[in-house]
Image (tube, helix red, strand yellow):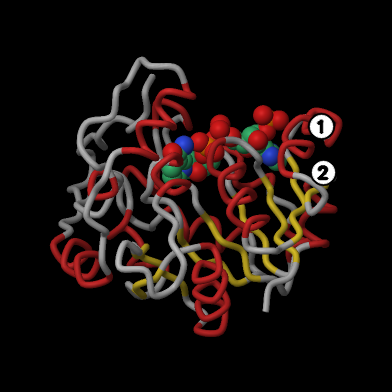
Amino acid sequence: MTKTLGLIGSGMIGGVLARLAVDAGLDVVLSNSRGPETLTDLVAELGPRARAATADEAARAGDLVVATIPLHAYDRLPADALAGRTVIDTMNYYPERDGRIAPLDRREVTSSTLVQRHLADSHVVKACNNAFYLALLTRARPAGSPERSALPLAGDDPAAKAETTALLDALGYDTVDIGTLDDSWRSEPGTPVYVRPYFPGMPPWGSSQDDLQRWFRETKAAPVTADLVKELTGLAVRNHAGERLPGRFTSD
Ligand SMILES: NC(=O)c1ccc[n+]([C@@H]2O[C@H](COP(=O)([O-])OP(=O)(O)OC[C@H]3O[C@@H](n4cnc5c(N)ncnc54)[C@H](OP(=O)(O)O)[C@@H]3O)[C@@H](O)[C@H]2O)c1
């Protein structure tokens, strides 16, 4: 059972997962690229269960670690410190942010397979990559709630997937196992399960973050059930080589 969650990356997704983890009674160790002293405000906001450290320390401190940084930096994840651990990979490939990564453009591998190759001694699980961060924050519900949603996950190691399922259960989500890391393209950008099903309508892009967050909290929507996740990931069609990936789903 995960007691301490390590986070490499403490931006939009890292911050939300830290919030959900603290609310679920876990300790969190946050890190980023600029150093722990730049995370003082976030740590204060999260309260006494949170602390900041270097990426290496966060990797070693976590029973389970989330890697949630821009994909272009995946080869800077601390492989030695992460050895033997389950690593949740939330990362998506956006060429306009990440630059061109040829094997991904050629659809030879999934982005998570690249991450797994770099973290050869860890067990990578792709999860939490297909929900906009405010949706991830506001759609979390306790187990048994009729409003509870599900998230897809993929990975090569059954025990790591079970560990991730237990963590996401505590954080407020059911999960649907969609296969191996090679299968994880079924939740990548541009697929039917990516971002849109978790939107309760059209968010007021351009509003302040506070207003946007309020909108996500107050706008009712049907849960994205496990059956719907299965259906949508089953409908996914892989882009042909060279086809442009759809743009980012953010307010910018
Ligand atoms: N935003 C979303 O709604 C969303 C949804 C699903 C998936 N994702 C994916 O999840 C990942 C994170 O997204 P995000 O929106 O949370 O990004 P973000 O807000 O830009 O945050 C990125 C974080 O990664 C840290 N970082 C960058 N390079 C690092 C390194 N080498 N070592 C340690 N930390 C590093 C940054 O720290 P510094 O600020 O100190 O550089 C920052 O804390 C991306 O791959 C994204 O595509 C995002």
Q: Quadrant of residue 248?
A: top left
Ligand 1 sits in quadrant? top right
Q: Quadrant of residue 218?
A: top left
Q: Nearer the viewer, residue 97 or 248?
A: 248
Q: Nearer the viewer, residue 15 or 107?
A: 15
Q: Position of residue 163 (x, y in %)?
A: 58, 77
Report the residue at 39% width, 41% height from top.
132
- Quadrant location of the C terminus in the rendered image: top left
Q: Is mark 2 within 8 Å of ligand 1?
A: no
- Quadrant location of the N terminus in the rendered image: bottom right
Q: Earlier in the sequence, mark 1 or mark 2?
A: 1
- Looking at the image, can residue 43 be seen? yes
Q: Which residue is mark 1?
A: 40
Q: Position of residue 60 (x, y in %)?
A: 82, 62
125 displayed left or right of 80? left
- How crowded pointer 2 is (Cα within 10 Å; few <14, some 14-19, many 20+) is rated as many
Q: Nearer the viewer, residue 209 or 56?
A: 209
In the rendered image of this protein, does residue 202 appear above or below residue 2? above
Query: Residue extending furthest bottom?
Result: 159
Report the residue at 35% width, 31% height from top.
215
In the rendered image of this protein, does residue 179 appear above or below residue 102? below
Q: Position of residue 62 (x, y in %)?
A: 76, 63
The disc placed on residue 52 is 2
Mark 1 in CB contact with mark 2 (< 8 angstroms)? yes
Residue at mark 1 to residue at mark 2: CA–CA distance: 8 Å
Q: Position of residue 151 (x, y in %)?
A: 37, 62
Q: Nearer the viewer, residue 153 or 151?
A: 151
Q: What is the three-letter code of the residue carrying label 1? A: Thr
Q: What is the three-letter code of the residue carrying label 2? A: Ala
